[in-house]
Amino acid sequence: MTVIHEINTLVWLGELGARYGRRVTLGDVPGEVWDEVARPGIDTVWLMGVWERSPAGLAIALRDKPLRASFRDALPDLTEADIAGSPYCVRDYVVDASLGGPDGLAEARAQLASRGVRLILDYVPNHVAPDHPWLAEHPERLIQGTREDLARAPEGFLDVGGRIYANGRDPFFAPWHDVVQLNAFDSDLRTATVDTLVSIGDQADGVRCDMAMLLMNDVFAKTWGDRAGPAPAEDFWPYVVPRVRARHPDLLFVAEAYWDLEWALQQQGFDHCYDKRLYDRLLHERAESTRAHLQADLAYQRGLVRFLENHDEPRAAAGFPDAARHRAAAVTVATLPGATLWHEGQFEGRKVRLPVFLSRRPQEPVDEQLRTFYGQLIPAAAAVRDGDWRLLTTTGWPDNDTHRNLLAWSWTGTDSRHVVIVNYSDAPAQGQVPLPWPDLAGRPCRLSDLLSDQTYDRDGGALLAPGLFVDLPAWHTHVLTVT
């Protein structure tokens, strides 16, 4: 099971420099820091934002008053030096020299590999910076416009060297002013995408593809119409992914994906796609909607990325201000099939969502209780997620239907059995959870909670029918080993 730890590389290295009283790059991060990053239960590190950022994109960002206001909201003592530009406005797919360059990244990868941890990096398939070499050398790879377009819609086009280009965009939002739109239908662009991803595969074990669904033929055609030209017979990712895997068969492909296109992108070659629907249900809805989501095909679920935060979402400690609900949601995402994504700072309870343009973040107090909780949860989840997963039913009584607020599942490994039960509600819940192991009949059983060290001795037959009796306070959980 893939467990990803996302790190804001630029901010992280800056804080390490302050901690050690010297400049720290990817090539000379102290060993004890890599031990902290590659903690037990983490098998993949995503170093977010290692590529060369764009001076031209930075200049555009600095002129954007609402954007600058968001910077100051997150960092009240903001200075110009704190604004580094967006890591998703890529000038070139070369590791920034200030971070240690390609040699520094190679050393970081080696340090992670020595600890049994993979490295993944970003790829931004939809757009490039306005000073990317392709604008001068390969303009056919980009969506172009006319002087009339620029005059009519200056918010959606820009002039670079006398040529008019479309700004990158998501069809449901305003254009991103600091980037230029690539043309997913251009055959030369597809070849260049393969080359770029092969190069990333030379430097890392996986790639996180930003806004991957924007490149799908039907989405791209609806967004750009005639400007893109005719749609190729083959979709974008089915063309790209196999050609990259011909060179890097084990390269992990992770898609940032929305709009219920996760299954389609899995079919087009991605190993994992963001599970935004689960995030939204845990944040805004009740247990029933989460249970319905978990009834989906298991192959589909194994291809999802479960998370409570990432650099695009509010911090979990802010989005889930009730600490007990935060912990219940964390147990949920940590123990489900599929990949899990944790965001650096989440374990300490950071609440400020930092714009990716910034190289520094505000100081925040550490939530020691939350840090202790995650310190227990991450290794416990690694032990639990072994073998076959099954969603379990819950039952109640005519005068007590609070079992509907209980979420329950089991994991059956070769030599292990685990049960996870979550009361995802703000009131106590009682119910019975029939366990899925017939050979428990007639045998005494012990259930040990990995997060509380409590043990419960039960008759195996009763665990099968009527089932394990559960009485959980609001937002409480059981993560049980069954022996």
Image: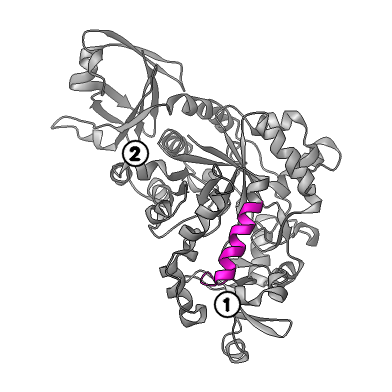
> Which quadrant is the C terminus positioned in?
top left
Membership of 10 in magenta stretch = no
Q: Position of residue 476 (x, y in %)?
A: 39, 30
Q: Is residue 348 left or right of residue 260?
A: right
Determine the CA span between mark 2 and mark 1.
49 Å
Judging depth in this view, the residue of 378 and 184 nearest the camera is 184
Q: Position of residue 197 (x, y in %)?
A: 61, 54
- How has the structure been colored for display? one colour
Outermost residue on the front side: it is 246
Residue 475 sits in quarter: top left
Three-letter code for the amino acid on which mark 2 is drawn: Ser
Q: Position of residue 450 (x, y in %)?
A: 45, 20
Any mark on residue 56, and which? none
Mark 2 lies on residue = 425
Q: Nearer the viewer, mark 2 or mark 1?
A: 1
Any mark on residue 143, and which? 1
Q: Is residue 150 left or right of residue 33?
A: left
Residue 251 sits in quarter: top right
Outermost residue on the left side: it is 398
Q: Which residues are magenta?
A: 182-199
Q: Position of residue 372 (x, y in %)?
A: 57, 27
Which badge, 2 or 1, is on the more N-terminal residue?
1
Q: Decide whether the magenta segment is chiefly helix, strand or loop.
A: helix
Q: Is residue 234 above or below residue 351?
A: below
At 47% from the left edge and 28% from the top edge, which residue is drawn? 381
Please say if the residues under marks 2 and 1 sit with CB atoms less than 8 Å apart. no
Judging depth in this view, the residue of 334 and 225 nearest the camera is 225
At 73% from the left edge and 44% from the top edge, which residue is drawn? 105
Membership of 198 in magenta stretch = yes
| Label 1 Cα neighbours within 10 Å, binned few <14 / some 14-19 / many ≥20 | many
Three-letter code for the amino acid on which mark 1 is drawn: Ile
